[in-house]
Image (cartoon, rainbow, N blue to C red):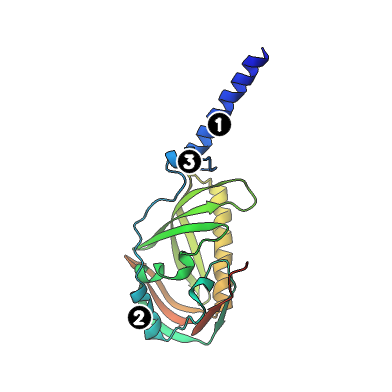
Amino acid sequence: MLRRVVMVLGVLVIVALVAVSYMGVVQVPVLSAAFGMDHPRDLHMVKDSTSLNEFTSKWGIELPSPTQNYNLGNKHHYSGSVQVDDTISEAALAALPEYSAPNKTLSQIQFRIHEGSIEMSAFVNVPGYPASGPMYTQFSISATGPRTVAVDFSHLDFGRVGVPGNVVDTVKTAVNEYLDRKILEAGVTIDTLQLHEGGIRFKGTWPKTITADPPKP
């Protein structure tokens, strides 16, 4: 009898491991890779450092810190202000070092900008939970005032699981609060913010100099 119980428990554990690795919500060695759940969806994002350098030079934006300092998890400092009235391509935005540097929560970030929306994929480690896996989302972003924006998600998946509406609302609130806080901190003002195929149309003010602290050891 004991042997049967152990066998049944063993089978249940195996089934559970296969299920969570297939759903992509927990990383299981070998199995997650076999199901393609150990990396985010490839959006075929292209990075163009030359376009980024041309954009920052055109508008007098300076990024003087070492490249490795520009990480989404590192403290940024802002000074000065320049007027910007232009469309920045998604390839130039993709070349920003913050999107290439992994942190504890997000890594392998990719995005594509379309008319009125953005699609994005990344590998996510959920803070405070033993959950990690690929994320895919589609969302819009619009200016609600000179120093505020609103993000609205039309699609959000974690692994193969569609995120419930109440969780999406929580994520939306957190993202909006984070963006508004960063806009205020950086001294950004927005006259125009529009999503077009392959780029973002922006008119307003942007920090002249952006520095970043060294990565924490």
Q: Residue at x 53, y 76 (%)?
A: 147
Q: Which residue is mark 2?
A: 54
First reached walking from the N terminus: tag 2 or tag 3 = 3
Residue 59 position by quadrant:
bottom left
Amino acid on which disc 2 is placed = Glu
The spot of residue 12 in percent (x, y) is 58, 26
Instruction: Tell me: residue 185, above or below residue 174.
Output: below
Quarter holding residue 5: top right
Which residue is tagged 1? Answer: 16
For marks 2 and 3, give the CA distance: 41 Å
Disc 3 residue type (three-letter):
Ser
Q: Which residue is painted at 46% across and 65% down in the image? A: 99
How many neighbours does mark 3 have within 10 angstroms: few (below 14), some (14-19), or many (20 or more)? many
Judge from the rendering whether residue 121 lies leftward or rightward of residue 76; answer left or right.
left
**Percent from the top left, x then y, of residue 136?**
44, 51
Amino acid at pointer 1: Ala
Label 3, on which residue? 32
Mark before the other along the chain sequence, 1 or 3: 1
Residue 198 in the figure: left or right of residue 168: left
Q: Nearer the viewer, residue 164 or 64?
A: 64
- Left or right of 47? Residue 134 is right
Residue 7 falls left or right of residue 82: right
